[in-house]
Amino acid sequence: MTKHELDAIHAMLASPHVSEPTRRALQARLETRYERQFLSEAEFARLQAAAVRLVPHDPAELDLSGPIDHRLSTGQSGDGWRYAELPPDGEAYRALLAALPDGFATQDGETQDAALSAVQESHARIFEDLLSELTEHFMAHPLTQYRFGYAGFADVPSWPEVGPNELEPREETYGPR
C-alpha cells in the first residue's frame, strides 16, 4: 500500500461523510494484524498460499488469512449459516488444508491451482465456505474499496446524486485515478 493510498483512505475515513461506528470498523480492518493462534504453522502457510491463489493479493498489504485464523481461535461462527453435515469450522478448515499436498505453499502457481481444483472437488462445501470468507475479507477491506474507487461506506446521509452515472464529489475524488 502506498503512502498516497493510505493518506487517501485516512482522509475519507476522517471526513464528515463517514459515521463513527463505520469509521472504527474500517480503521480496525485497515490496521489490525493477527498473529497465528489456531492453525499450525504448516496449516497457516497452506491457508496463506491458497488465499493468494484464490483471491490474488499481497499478504503484506492485506491480511486475509489472519482474520480467519483469529475467528477460528475465538470460536466465532462465520457468516451465520453452515451446512449441517459439516464438522465445526476449525475441523472443516483443517481437513481442507490437510488435503493440500505437502509443500503446497512453495509450489508454483500452476501446481497450486491443480491442487486447489482437486480440493474443490473433494471438499466442495468447505472450499465454498473458505472462498466466501476470503472474498468477504477482501471486499470489506478499505484498501480494496479504495482501489475499486468504492465510497459507498460513506454512510452519513446526503447523497443527492443518485441517478445512473451521477457521482458525488466525494466519489469523483476517491480511488486511484
Image (spheres, grey):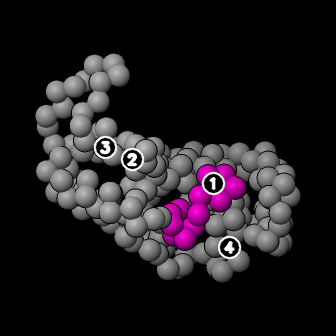
Mark in front: 4 vs 3? 3
Quick one: SS at disc 4?
helix
Describe residue 126's horizontal placement relative to residue 76 as left or right. right
**In which image quadrant can residue 58 be found?**
bottom right
Q: Position of residue 25 (x, y in %)?
A: 29, 59
**Residue drawn at 43 percent across, 56 percent down:** 143
Segment colored magenta: 52-66
Q: Are marks 1 and 2 in contact (CB under 8 Å)?
A: no
Q: Are marks 1 and 3 in contact (CB under 8 Å)?
A: no
Residue under pointer 1 = 56
Q: Residues within 10 Å of mark 2 (few under 14, many from 20)?
A: some
Distance between the alpha carbons at the discs numbered 2 and 3: 7 Å
Mark in front: 1 vs 4? 1
Describe residue 148's horizontal placement relative to residue 174 as left or right. right
Which is more N-terminal, label 3 or label 4?
4
Residue under pointer 3 = 173
Kind of residue at badge 2 = Gly
Q: Kindly tell me whether residue 138 is visible in this rendering.
A: yes
